Amino acid sequence: MNYKGDMKEDILKELINIYVGQAASLLSEIVDNKIELRVPVIKILDNEYGLESGEYPHLLKGALMVSSMRFENELKGRAELIFPANHIKELISLCMGEEIEQVHELAEFTDADLDIVKEIGNIVLNAVIGGLGNFLQMKIDYSMPEVKIFDNIEVEELWDRKNKRNMLILFVTFKIGGTEIDGALIINFTLDSMKELMSKIEEIESNL
């Protein structure tokens, strides 16, 4: 089945922007600073549509920090929140209300840095996956989030190994203190879970 279509992507984008908005509100309360999160672009990859070279997320190149979480029960898959590693220290500094730092060597990341990224990932991923679960009225069990750092070669290998089907790629803009940092949220679904989601989206599309 071809899930591709501008209307489907628009419906999903509107839904997910609600969920990331909820995550932004919670993060704003935690760090006592206004945080905005939005998803300006979303791509649906299915068994008939893959990612064209011109659509390849530019931020999936270079060193990355990835916060990932598995989800299962009635809705199953894996979600990954991805930021370029050279900007993540800046994001951490902004969230902590500290002077902005930029990282030049991956070894500069501390355990405290990883804990902060893990918490950001936990809040954002839970909001999006939990929101989709509520939307589909499906139960979800979450794994604990994991944070890893990948260099350029590892990123390419990781992407090549991925099943590039039954996947949503969301470009995420994280805004705090007048500074914008771009990232991505990649959600891999099982085939059945993707069918459930797109069936619900098609139902909404037919009623518009």
Image (cartoon, helix red, strand yellow):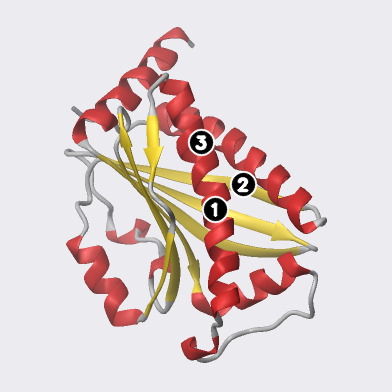
Quadrant of the rendered structure where residue 96 is? bottom right
Amino acid at pointer 2? Arg
- The answer to whether marks 1 and 2 mark residues whose Cβ atoms lie closer than 8 Å is yes
Q: Residue at x 54, y 53 (%)?
A: 172
Q: Amino acid at mark 1?
A: Val
Quadrant where the N terminus lies?
top left
Q: Residues within 10 Å of mark 2 (few under 14, many from 20)?
A: many
Residue 166 appears at what percent x and percent y? 25, 40
Q: For the point 28% across and 77% down, which residue is it?
A: 154
The answer to whether the residue labelled 3 contacts the one labelled 2, judged by CB atoms less than 8 Å apart, is: no
Q: In the image, is residue 78 above or below residue 116?
A: above
Can I make out residue 170 in this image? Answer: yes
Can residue 10 be seen here? no
Tell me the SS state at disc 3.
helix
- Residue 103 position by quadrant: bottom right
Q: CA distance from mark 3 to mark 2?
A: 9 Å
Give x and y (percent) for residue 179.
73, 66
Q: Along the polypeptide, which appears first: circle 1 or circle 3?
A: 3
Which residue does the numbered mark 1 point to in the structure image?
A: 172
| Marks 1 and 2, how far apart at CA | 6 Å
**Residue drawn at the location 29% of the way across and 61% of the way down:** 53
Q: Is residue 11 above or below residue 34?
A: above
Image position, residue 180 (x, y; %)? 68, 63
| Vertical arrangement, residue 60 with respect to residue 45, above or below | below
Which element is circle 1 on?
Answer: strand
Percent of width and height locating residue 7? 43, 27
Which numbered disc covers residue 38? 2
Determine which residue is flagged by label 3: 13
Left or right of 49? Residue 13 is right
Between residue 105 and residue 109, name the one nearer to us: 109
The answer to which of 80 and 144 lies nearer the viewer is 144
